[in-house]
Image (tube, rainbow, N blue to C red):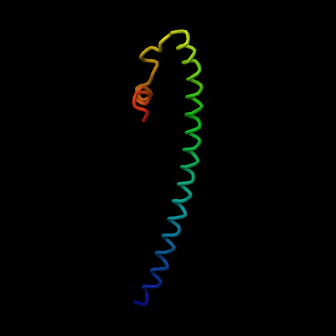
Amino acid sequence: MAAAPAQRQVDLAILEKTTERLDRENNEIRSELTGLRGLVRAYSWTVDRPMRRMEHARIPPAEEDVHDLVRDHMRTGA
C-alpha cells in the first residue's frame, strides 16, 4: 500500500510526458496539413487557369489528363 502513491506519481509523470509528446506531434501534423492544403489550393488555382482557357477555346481535356481521384472529386464533390 505504501508504494501505491509513489506508483501513481510515476504513472502520472509518464502520462504527462506522453500527453506533451502527443500535443507536440499533433501541432506538427496540423501545421503540415495546413501547408499541404495551401499547396493543393495553389495547384488547383494554377491548373484551373489553363483548363478554363482550353474550355473557352472548346478544347476538351483528354481522358488521361484528369486523374481518377480528381475526376471522382469533380463528380461527387467529396
User: Which residue: 51% across, 73% down?
Assistant: 13
**63, above or below 76, in the image:** above
Q: Is residue 42 above or below residue 10?
A: above
As rendered, which of 76 and 33 lies closer to the eye? 76
Foreground: 21 or 46? 46
Q: Residue at x 55, y 34 (%)?
A: 40
Q: Quadrant of the C terminus?
A: top left
Who's the residue at 43% across and 33% down the image?
A: 77
Which image quadrant is residue 3 in?
bottom left
Q: Is residue 14 above or below residue 44?
A: below
Asked if residue 31 is positioned above or below residue 49 in the image, the reply reads below
The location of residue 23, given as percent across then percent down, is 54, 59
Percent coordinates x, y for residue 35 in the rendering? 59, 41
Please name the residue shown 49% across and 75% down the image: 12
Residue 49: % across, % down: 59, 21
Which quadrant of the rendered structure holds the N terminus?
Answer: bottom left
Residue 2: quadrant of the picture: bottom left
Residue in front for this viewpoint, 17 or 65: 65
- Residue 24 position within the rendered picture, expressed as x and y whole percent measured from the top left: 56, 57
State how many labels appear: 0
Q: In this view, which residue lies farthest toward the bottom?
A: 2
